[in-house]
Amino acid sequence: MAGALKNVTDDSFEEVVLKSDKPVLVDFWAAWCGPCRQIAPSLEAIAADHDEIEIVKLNIDENPATAAKYGVMSIPTLNVYQGGEVAKTIVGAKPKAAILRDLEGFIVEKPQ
């Protein structure tokens, strides 16, 4: 299921993220970032389990304007956008359970 997350760019960011009618988590990442690669499977699993939130990736090397606009200084940074605004920022690699805790209020936790 690797690579299941949609990629957004500086050009598509407004349409895909800011105009979305549901919360969108944007994973600001880069190919050279080890911790970014570590959290990718967790984000893909969360995306597969939770259709109430959209999860997309933005490569900061290829799309520096959006990263600069939102002040992304270290990666991985996960921003949750709701109604065109940043509703939550999560910085650094975390285990899936911690990411899910951080997303409470945006997702519905399903019983195991």
Image (cartoon, grey):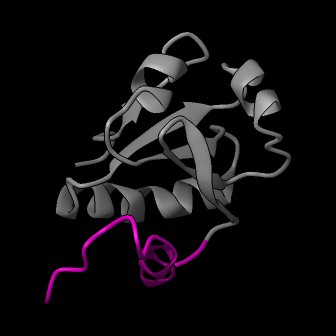
Vertical comparison of 49 with 37: above or below: below
Tell me, yes or no, whether the highlighted magenta stretch contains residue 102.
yes
Q: Residue 63 at x, y = what percent?
A: 67, 20
- Range of residues picked out in magenta: 94-112
Q: Residue 71 at x, y = what percent?
A: 83, 40
Q: Residue 25 at x, y = what percent?
A: 47, 49
Vertical comparison of 48 with 69: above or below: below
Q: Which of 68 and 37 is in front in this view?
A: 68
Q: Quadrant of residue 4?
A: top left
Residue drawn where x is 73% and y is 51% of the image: 75
Residue drawn where x is 67% and y is 19% of the image: 62
Q: Nearer the viewer, residue 69 or 97?
A: 69
Q: Nearer the viewer, residue 95 or 66?
A: 66
Q: Predominant secondary structure in magenta? A: loop
Task: Residue at the far front: name it.
Answer: 83
Q: Residue 29 at x, y = what percent?
A: 63, 42
| Quadrant in which the C terminus appears | bottom left
Q: Quadrant of residue 76?
A: bottom right
State left or right for residue 76 relative to residue 9.
right
Q: Quadrant of residue 92?
A: bottom right
Vertical comparison of 15 with 39: above or below: above
Task: Residue at the far top: name it.
Answer: 11
